[in-house]
Image (cartoon, grey):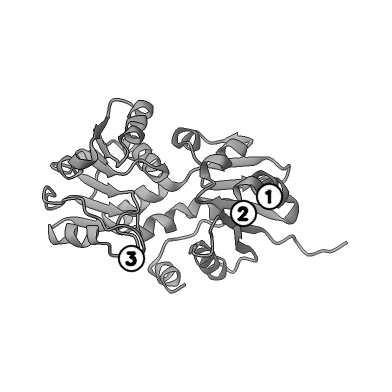
Amino acid sequence: MSDHPRIPVAGVIGSPIAHSRSPALFRHWLNSYGIAGHYVPLDVNQADLETVLRTLPRMGFVGVNITIPHKERALEIADVVSDRAALIGAANTLILRADGKIHADNTDGYGFIANLNQHAPNWVAGAGPAAVLGAGGAARAIVASLLETGAPEIRISNRTRARAEALRTEFGARVVVYDWVQAGNMIEGANTVVNTTSLGMTGKADFRVPLDALSPGTTCCDLVYSPLRTRFLVDAEEAGCVVVDGLGMLLHQAVPGFERWFGQRPEVTDALRDAVLSA
């Protein structure tokens, strides 16, 4: 019988997954804290997801991050679901317990708020309405976190209005839906403006929402981090806004998972940003 302790293994599951920066992120933390552990990317087809998740604990895996297109399905597979994951309707962090049970959580909203607190320290959710572009899975996490932190009103606009209407139905009267052609209008008077769409991302359609209504001092955050400085953020900064890029959300959302899996609460530092950007 070996006296060596079992080395914990975690990873990120998606399809495709080769582009993920999470392995570089976790590798930096494991090295920085001198932790014997591994974090690997796993490209898994949707049809195989449950089989893979049920097998991983037997292979020494203690948890995985979940990304596109598996966040909703992972929630359905999980044996235990946190309140915030249930509210958002998706999971991005799974804890694989020794008894084989799968615990699902969603830390995207936590990562979003922590990113704002770090890079826009004077930001206060309750200071005014928030305008959210997009109504997909990321938007759900953003809306939930903004409501929880006291935003008095969430204005949502999405190219497919029905998806925005679904968020209003689920999150209640503080959510107000705007047609996509009015997206620029809903920004007027907003304290916080968030782009949760892929517009402006490398290889995707350009960001063309009019920003004339932005007020100086408004906090603007783009969840896109490739490129790091998107057209939305460049234009917002020129308008006198406080801008926050999307990389910080990726870094902060990983903190709870790393702590649970490897027993150390990590810090989000400039050195970490540099390591992930250079990956």
Where residue 27 sits: x, y (%)?
55, 67
Is 240 situated left or right of 172 in this image?
left
In front: mark 3 or mark 2? Answer: 2
Q: Quadrant of residue 159?
A: top left
Where residue 247 sits: x, y (%)?
38, 60
Instruction: State the mark number for residue 52.
Output: 1
For the residue marked with disc 2, what is the amino acid? Val
Is residue 35 something that shows in the picture?
Answer: yes
Q: Residue at x 43, y 58 (%)?
A: 251
Tag 1 secondary structure: helix
Pointer 3 with pointer 2, Cβ within 8 A: no
Tag 2 secondary structure: loop
Q: Residue at x 27, y 58 (%)?
A: 206
Upstream in sequence: badge 3 or badge 2: 2
Q: Residue at x 74, y 60 (%)?
A: 6
Q: Which residue is mark 2?
A: 44
Nearer to the camera, 37 or 193: 193
Is residue 121 something that shows in the picture?
Answer: no
Distance from disc 1 to disc 2, alpha carbons, whole Å, reads 8 Å
User: Mark 3, residues whose alpha carbon is within 10 Å: few (<14), some, or many (≥20)?
Assistant: few
User: Mark 2, residues whose alpha carbon is within 10 Å: few (<14), some, or many (≥20)?
Assistant: some
